[in-house]
Image: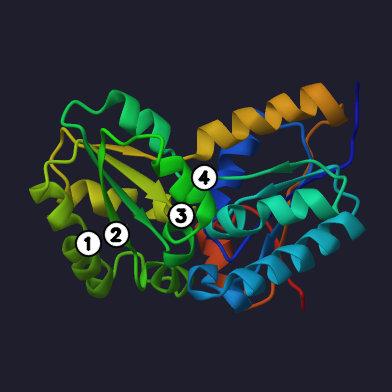
Amino acid sequence: MTNDRPIGVFDSGIGGTSIWKAIHDLLPNEQTIYLADSKNAPYGQKSKAEIIALSMKNTDLLIEMGCKIIVVACNTATTNAIQELRAKYTIPFIGIEPAIKPAATHSKTQTIGILATKGTLNSELFNKTTEKYQDIKIIEQIGHGLVQLIEDGQINSLEMTQLLYSYLTPMINANIDYLVLGCSHYPYLIPQIKKILPEHIQIIDSGEAVAKQTQNVLRDTVGFSTAKNNTPIFYTNTNSKVLSEILENKYQVEEKDF
């Protein structure tokens, strides 16, 4: 089964490009359209109703652009809106959730840390997931301010370093051996985080798992592209500079009002 229509990807800003990169690396022949809803970032501070409305707005736009599948490259949007999206639309959706299972399964200290947004940690879906691991101590930390600093291009700022130290030190003291990154923005902080964490603590994000799930759904339902050398398309509803820089200026980024 072949299908040359694009894969749609959306996030509350530039962070979902970490998921997009994993998909693009695994499925280089697929055309992709990425929406960075930076104007409304971070989603993690918004109400469930607001997150659902924004997710539907992004979905409508990607469907208008002819997408065959939509990747919700945002933990907050997935944990708060994926059920409503699947109920309303017939197009397949791939969500992204914090990768608690591999961390909980492999932890030797029976203690793991999760750094995520308020919207993700407070969601019903996240709480249902954590309930499965009653024998594991989960140290939860809301990453207040991290998304906005990333959106502002301040990944290596002193303020970012200070915030990360304040969030990660209690986890280190609690003897975690896995840190789960529960926001698609956070993989861009891995170099910073590695300077703070002891070497034995492993960092887990969801990019590779989401890419493999996307591949599975394409194979089983909508089909793969036969095209070669597709150029990814990126849209942002704010200044394109930070998104261009996070993509290492390899791709054109178009500013669009949505």
Q: What residue type is labelled 4?
A: Glu
Q: Distance between the residues labelled 2 and 4?
A: 16 Å
| Quadrant position of residue 52 | bottom right
Q: Residues within 10 Å of mark 2 (few under 14, many from 20)?
A: some
Q: Which of marks 2 and 4 is nearer the N terminus?
A: 4
Q: In this view, does 152 lie above or below 193?
A: below
Q: Which of marks 4 and 1 is nearer the N terminus?
A: 4
Q: Name the residue under label 2.
A: 141
Q: Earlier in the sequence, mark 3 or mark 2?
A: 2
Q: Do the residues labelled 2 and 1 touch (CB within 8 Å)?
A: yes
Residue placed most toward the observer, 252 or 171: 171
User: Horizontal placement of 190 versus 223: left or right?
Assistant: left
| Quadrant position of residue 26 | top right
Relative image position of residue 136 (x, y in whole percent): 26, 36
Relative image position of residue 229 (x, y in whole percent): 78, 36
SS at circle 3: loop
User: Horizontal placement of 61 versus 116: left or right?
Assistant: right
